[in-house]
Amino acid sequence: MQCPFPYSFIAFEGNIGAGKTTLCERLAHTYGCALVLEQFTDNPFLPRFYEQPERYGFPVELFFMTERHKQLQEHFSSPDLFRSCTLADYVFLKTLLFANKNLQKDEFRLFQRLFHVLNAGFPKPDLLVYLHRPLEVLLHQIQKRGRDMEYAIQPDYLLGLQSAYFEFLKTETEIPVLILDLGDLDFQQNEDVFNQIVHVLVEKHASGLQFRSLTM
């Protein structure tokens, strides 16, 4: 099936447990889109970071940044000519958002310099979609998927990430940025919810921040 989206590169963001990867996988499977998924489970520092964030913040963020850079560089240097649209479950700038939250000030200054070197030349997505869910839904999703290393995640940490995302999204004016409020809706089991998301993605959106809530 031909990709119906009027964008060649759509990036999805959201808090931990929002459903970014699951949605990307279903959209790619349904419409034959190219797929870029973050390989976060390969980060050897992540389980230790959740237990001792101050000690392991810098290595965990450095590993994430270099892996994301390698993945995006490989994808965009050799595009798939048979797929008209790329879907990604992250945007490279999230590297800086997480680092700003997780690192000490002197560590972040160094990290920021490295980030700007690596970020030069990467294309921005044509559409950035932030999947928003209430805190209680995120916590339920995290528990439901049962990853041992995520059990230590605290509600305050998720709220802090949400605030960091919202502050960034307000500053992005060059591309369309859509905050899509999913509430507790299940796009895996409910076909109507999935179709509503598809209809939103098919639309042409103006640059800057916009809000949309799904209905049932």
Image (spheres, rainbow, N blue to C red):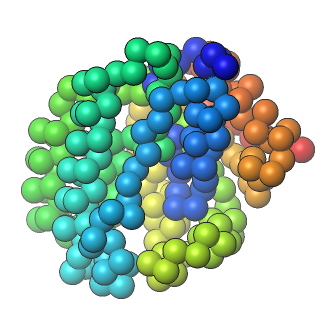
Q: For residue 199, which quarter of the picture?
A: top right
Query: Which residue is drawn at the image coordinates 44% and 78% (left, top)?
Result: 149
Q: Is residue 145 left or right of residue 115?
A: right
Q: Position of residue 98 (x, y in %)?
A: 34, 58
**For this rendering, which residue is in front, 62 or 162?**
62
Query: Which residue is drawn at the image coordinates 67% and 61% (left, top)?
Result: 134
Q: Position of residue 52 (x, y in %)?
A: 30, 84
Query: Which residue is drawn at the image coordinates 71% and 29% (left, top)?
Result: 198
Above or below: residue 89 compared with residue 45 = above
Q: Does residue 178 appear in this view?
A: no
**Most distant residue in the right direction:** 216
Q: Position of residue 90 (x, y in %)?
A: 43, 44
Q: Is residue 111 left or right of residue 203?
A: left
Quarter in which the C terminus is drawn: top right
Above or below: residue 125 compared with residue 131 = above
Above or below: residue 78 compared with residue 137 = above
Q: Is residue 46 left or right of residue 209?
A: left
Q: For residue 206, which quarter of the picture?
A: top right
Query: Which residue is drawn at the image coordinates 33% and 63% (left, top)?
Result: 42
Q: Position of residue 148 (x, y in %)?
A: 49, 80
Above or below: residue 5 compared with residue 116 = above
Q: For residue 192, which quarter of the picture?
A: top right
Number of numbered discs: 0
Q: Does residue 144 appear in this view?
A: yes
Quarter in which the N terminus is drawn: top right
Q: Is residue 202 left or right of residue 149?
A: right
